[in-house]
Amino acid sequence: MTSLSFSTFSAWVSIDGEKARVYGVDSSEADRVTGWIASEVDKPFEISWKDSLVEFPTRGRIYIDGEFSGGKSLCRKQDANKPTQRWGMRISATEQRPYTFAHLATTDDDSVSNTLPQSIGQIELEISQATIENIKAQPRSYRDLPPEMVFNERDKKSYDHHVKFGSPVKSRASSFMDKKWTGIGQPIVTFCFKYRPLAILQAEGIAPLPPQAPKHFPQVPKQEGRAANTIASRSITLQEDDVEALENRALALQAESNDIKARLEAIKKRKRRSGDVKVEDQANSKRVKREYTTVPGEIEVIDLT
């Protein structure tokens, strides 16, 4: 899901040109719809909304971290189902400063006692029915942007991000206004996008964790002999989420293998002591002829090569 909806209205946030996925949508309140999005540091974003019918003029007002941050209106029938958006705050007739996610500025200085705003971490769009009035053209006024505040590290909790205003960007000239918009009554709906880093949303169970890629274990080289047969006769299931158990299993198998090797070596020694002689040479195989001397119990070995 990438948008919040109420009646004929819908709204969404696009980050760096892409619609943000919305998690944990809550519409339990009569005139308020809430969802969560993942914020990305230094990425600009815009808020978009539309009315599928435009049965009457409406005004949309945006509040970011509790501060008024601009607005727009919808009034023409031909604008039905056409999105309108805001991507920044106008600071002059030809420039705007874009909305941008940023790290919350913090300090460990105990003398800093700025209180985190109650609405920090929220992007709200308040839509109200409105009246429109033609007025004599007059120069536009521009609001001062709120200063970036520094908060104490101990107070930030899970609020790692906030919204700042980026460097000025040229925009379509707009130096005069000739219409006045006035909201009527209570808002029809308030869309609230709560934002946090994706890791925090995942840690709190709001956003799903990414799927785990299966791990591929190397093939064990083929072995020969009784030790290999003993080990191979056991079924070993590699569980990637039980590393400790695998390590203990490997140690046990290694100990068993060492024990078998020791027993084989003991058998070979007993055979050598009993008089059986076996000569092996991988580089040059020699033929050995055993001949018995006339002395009982003694063996004479004669090399015929």
Image (spheres, rainbow, N blue to C red):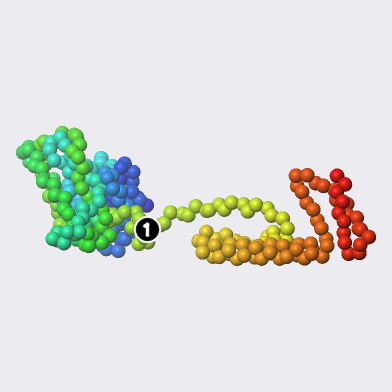
| Amino acid bearing label 1 | Gln
The residue under the point 91% across, 58% down is 292
Taking the view exactly as shown, the residue that stands out farthest to the right is: 294
Q: Is residue 90 left or right of residue 25?
A: left
The residue under the point 35% across, 55% down is 199
Residue occupied by mark 1: 202
Q: Nearer the viewer, residue 6 or 254?
A: 254
Q: Nearer the viewer, residue 126 or 297?
A: 297
Label 1, secondary structure: give it: helix
Q: Quadrant of residue 93?
A: top left
Q: Quadrant of residue 42?
A: top left
Give the answer, above or below, for where 26 lies relative to 70: below
User: Residue 156 at x, y = what percent?
Assistant: 23, 60
Q: Quadrant of the C terminus?
A: top right
Q: Is residue 192 visible?
A: no
The residue under the point 35% across, 62% down is 204
Q: Is residue 168 left or right of residue 18?
A: left
Q: Is residue 296 left or right of residue 145?
A: right
User: Residue 34 at x, y = what percent?
Assistant: 28, 58
User: Residue 88 at x, y = what percent?
Assistant: 20, 43
Give the answer, above or below, for where 137 lies relative to 226: above
Q: Nearer the viewer, residue 266 or 28?
A: 266
The residue under the point 40% across, 57% down is 208
| Classed neighbour count for the residue bearing mark 1: other residues with Cα under 10 Å, few (<14), some (14–19), many (≥20) | some
Q: Quadrant of residue 231?
A: bottom right
Q: Number of marks in the image?
A: 1
Q: Is residue 97 visible?
A: yes
User: Residue 266 at x, y = what percent?
Assistant: 73, 65
